[in-house]
Amino acid sequence: MSHHPALSRPLFHDADQNFDAKIVLGSVGAGAGDLGEIFATLAAVEDGKRESWVRAWFARAQATQQLAQVSESSGRAATAAAQWLRASAYYGHALNAIAAIGDTDGYANAFAMHRAAWDRFASLRRVPLEGCSIRYGKGAIPGFLQRPDVPPRDGLSPLLVLVNGSDGTLTDLYATIGAAAAARGYAVLYFDGPGQQSQLVAGSHFRPDFEAVLTPVIDHALGLPGVDGSRVAVYGVSQAGYWVPRALAFEHRVAAAIVDPGVTDVSTSWVGHLPSPLRHELEKGDSKHFDQYMKLGLGHSAAERAVWNFRARPYASTGYFAVYREVGKYRLNPELAASITTPLLITAPENEQFWPGQSDELAGLVPDAELVRFTAVNGADSHCEPLARTAVNEVLLDWLDARLDARAAARGDAGFGTPEVTREAVATESALR
């Protein structure tokens, strides 16, 4: 592994806070944060104290919301939209810490404020985000359509469908790649899947068979006016590095897809933290002793119990053993991976802390999948490359432009007019990262 001293120096000694701080800093390029506000807020956080993190970000979010309200009432729509976006992001930064404290009511309250701020940003943005309802089962899941910043010449835009991870917000998705894609000419579709964000608050749970989710989303996407149905792509971040490939094994209408990073087995990030005796009980299938040991181990720490409850909540199970068995279903078998026909780009960040090595494994399972590596020497390491989103998006969207241009060329359309990005070009450019 390569390291750079300036980048390996932690902002916080607490690993969760340090990683979250990197996510916060990485959002600046998309306007979902301001460096002065961010550093002033981080300075108020006590290392390792979740309550301190919550207080600091909640205070910052409320202050930014007040600015947005004044700007909006004064008719300064552009300024208000920018401030509402930052307020939404700042409320979002408090959410996971609130959940890890075990404050269920506080989480619901903070989430409502976060989503209300997002809604105001969506409506006031120069190109407003359009709220939509996506049919799912007997009901619907909420979504937002972001039109491209510049209207397409032929009236039809390529579409990038964004699939979130286990606990990210829509603001996170916007900052991660949504804003960059819209600036390139993509329409962007955001949605809350089962167990994600608003759907978690409503009581739904994750599901391992994500084709049951992505297929109705693609159905909806193909019916959108102004969208080129032959150029619909999908981007999956974090745990969606499992969900997207799983869905692509069944859903073949997607023109190209990116996972950031690749995930073949979600459960390793859970099992890896267990001491060997507990892993042995889990492998034996001894639910009674496993639950007893887990209860004993977590019994001395209210904080650890709260974190467990937060992480277990999106899975449709109760009891320690049952949750681990449920998470064990989130595994992509080689037969399904081999059935993926969609062109797939997989990121492999150095120092991936949650699913190390699984990007390479996925690339070996999916026919003709391409792997792009990002390195620490340029600050593009760690899970989802939080500090290097501009550089990472340049590589990812160049690859996507080329794949969709190839489809347009096959139809005789102009496409984006960008040069073909070959496998060798991706490899060369990634080496510079």
Image: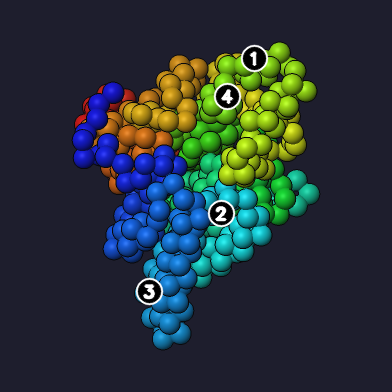
Q: The disc labelled 3 sits on which kind of residue?
A: Ala
Q: Do the residues labelled 3 and 1 touch (CB within 8 Å)?
A: no
**Image: 51 above or below 120:** above
Can you say which quadrant of the picture contains the C terminus?
top left
Q: The disc labelled 4 sits on which kind of residue?
A: Leu
Q: Name the residue under label 4.
A: 274
Q: Is mark 4 on a helix, strand or loop?
A: loop
First of labels 3, 1 by sequence position: 3
Q: How far apart are marks 1 and 4 (CA)?
A: 10 Å
Q: Distance between the residues labelled 3 and 1?
A: 57 Å
Q: What element carries label 3?
A: helix
Q: Do the residues labelled 1 and 4 touch (CB within 8 Å)?
A: no
Query: Which residue lies at the image location 62% right of the left edge and 50% below the top edge?
Result: 102
Q: The disc labelled 1 sits on which kind of residue?
A: His
Q: Are marks 2 and 3 in contact (CB under 8 Å)?
A: no
- The answer to which of 399 and 141 lies nearer the viewer is 141
- Rendered location of residue 224, percent (x, y): 57, 54
- The answer to which of 178 and 25 lies nearer the viewer is 25
Q: Name the residue under label 2.
A: 98
Query: Could you tell me how many numbered marks the image carries?
Result: 4
- Rendered location of residue 190, percent (x, y): 53, 52
Q: In this view, does 2 lie to the left or right of 75?
A: left
- Rendered location of residue 143, percent (x, y): 59, 55
